[in-house]
Amino acid sequence: MANHKSALKRIRQNEKRKVRNRYYHKTARSAMKILRNEEDKTQAAEQLPKVVSLLDKLAKKNIIHKNKAANLKSKLTKHVNKLA
């Protein structure tokens, strides 16, 4: 266990951030799953910018790597364009 006041504060901060980051990451994953399961092209095209925005925010906050965000955005865009 930490002995210094600053170390105790750091532990509290890390725990808060972990919970917040986990929430954002899970929200984005759920949004991607919904988008992948979408059958209608117009609905998917409406959802795509929102999901891309979520991924960009995750990359900006270093929750996921920027290249992973780019790869996911590319795959989702291809999926939406492929829908009939």
Image (cartoon, helix red, strand yellow):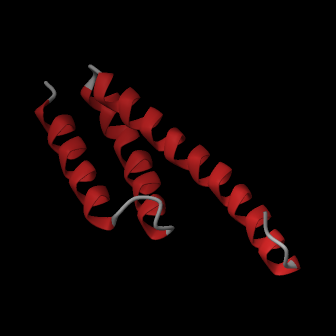
In the displayed structure, does residue 25 sit left or right of residue 36? right
In the displayed structure, does residue 56 sit left or right of residue 11? left
Residue under the image location 21 percent in, 36 percent down: 80
What is the number of callouts on the image?
0
Query: Residue 42's image quarter?
Result: top left
Quadrant of image for the C terminus: top left
Q: Is residue 19 above or below residue 32?
A: below
Q: Position of residue 41 (x, y in %)?
A: 25, 28
In the displayed structure, does residue 15 sit left or right of residue 84? right
Q: Is residue 7 or residue 45 the one in the foreground?
A: 7
Q: Is residue 20 above or below residue 32?
A: below
Q: Position of residue 12 (x, y in %)?
A: 79, 62
View extreme (right): residue: 5
Residue under the image location 52 percent in, 39 percent down: 26
Query: Residue 78's image quarter?
Result: top left
Q: Is residue 74 or residue 44 the one in the foreground?
A: 74
Quadrant of image for the N terminus: bottom right
Q: Position of residue 45 (x, y in %)?
A: 31, 38
Residue under the image location 85 percent in, 74 percent down: 3
Residue under the image location 24 percent in, 42 percent down: 76
